[in-house]
Image: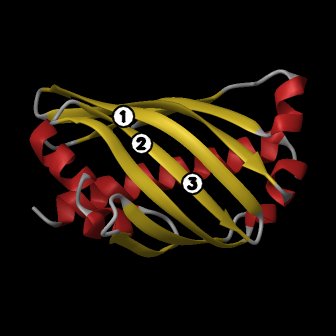
Amino acid sequence: MGNDRLSQAPCRNILKGTVKFEGSHTIPVPREIAWRELMNPQTLARALPGCEKFEANPAGGFDVVLKIGIASLKGVYQGHVEIQEPNPPQSYRMKVEGKGTGGFLKGEGVLSLMESAGNTTINYSGDAQVGGPIAGIGQRLVQAAARQIIQQFFQSLANVIQGSR
């Protein structure tokens, strides 16, 4: 139950490697449960495709290691995720930075949670800068890979949450 949109940025953004994304996914649990699980590193590690590590960092945020096996993005990526401006259980801002065999990524996004009839719709939007070989494969391929990872994450998240209830 998702609706993903990645912008068709103008050509000038292709050279910069900018990817904009937005969408929504509905998970069949109340908002408080969805919020709790989105803040749970163990849940996120199980839901994030290719996640080899998702651990709290004593300095704040989470350290992440992902193994991605999608087309030209294949490789191991290490990064850091920070949750900013949390407004439980309604919204938060997320800052992500990472690098690996395929290049680097730096992005920010906002997630908001809306409850209706016991279901939670998670709306998200943001943008990311990519560089290195990732930027060289073309915006369409980067967008397609991002869309696939986001879709897999939300499907897995719903399965993980439902399986833990």
Label 1 Cα neighbours within 10 Å, binned few <14 / some 14-19 / many ≥20: some
In space, the residues marked 1 and 2 are separated at their CA atoms by 8 Å
Q: Are marks 3 and 2 in contact (CB under 8 Å)?
A: no
Number of numbered discs present? Answer: 3
Residue 76 falls in which quadrant of the image?
Answer: bottom right
The relative height of residue 35 versus residue 40 in the rendered view (above or below) is: above
Q: Callout 3: 10 Å neighbours few (<14), some, many (20+)?
A: many
Disc 1 residue type? Leu
Which scheme is used to colour this image of the protein? secondary structure
Residue at left 48%, top 60%? 80
Q: Amino acid at mark 2?
A: Met
Q: Residue furthest top?
A: 10
Secondary structure found at label 1: strand
**Residue that badge 3 annotates:** 97
Q: Disc 3 versus disc 1: distance between alpha carbons?
A: 17 Å
In which quarter of the view is residue 5 placed? top right
> Which marked residue is nearer to the observer: mark 3 or mark 1?
3
On the image, the x and y values in percent for residue 131 come to: 79, 51
Q: Nearer the viewer, mark 1 or mark 2?
A: 2
Residue carrying label 1: 111
Q: CA distance from mark 3 to mark 2?
A: 10 Å
Q: Are marks 1 and 2 in contact (CB under 8 Å)?
A: yes
Residue drawn 67% across the image and 70% down it:
69
Is label 3 in a helix, a strand or a loop? strand
Mark 2 residue element: strand
Amino acid type of the residue that numbered disc 3 sits on in the rendered structure: Glu
**Residue 145 location, x and y as percent?**
68, 51
Q: Quadrant of the C terminus?
A: bottom left
Work out whether residue 126 or residue 143 is closer to the camera in this orientation and state it.
126
Does residue 69 appear anywhere in the picture?
yes
Residue located 34% across and 46% down the image: 83
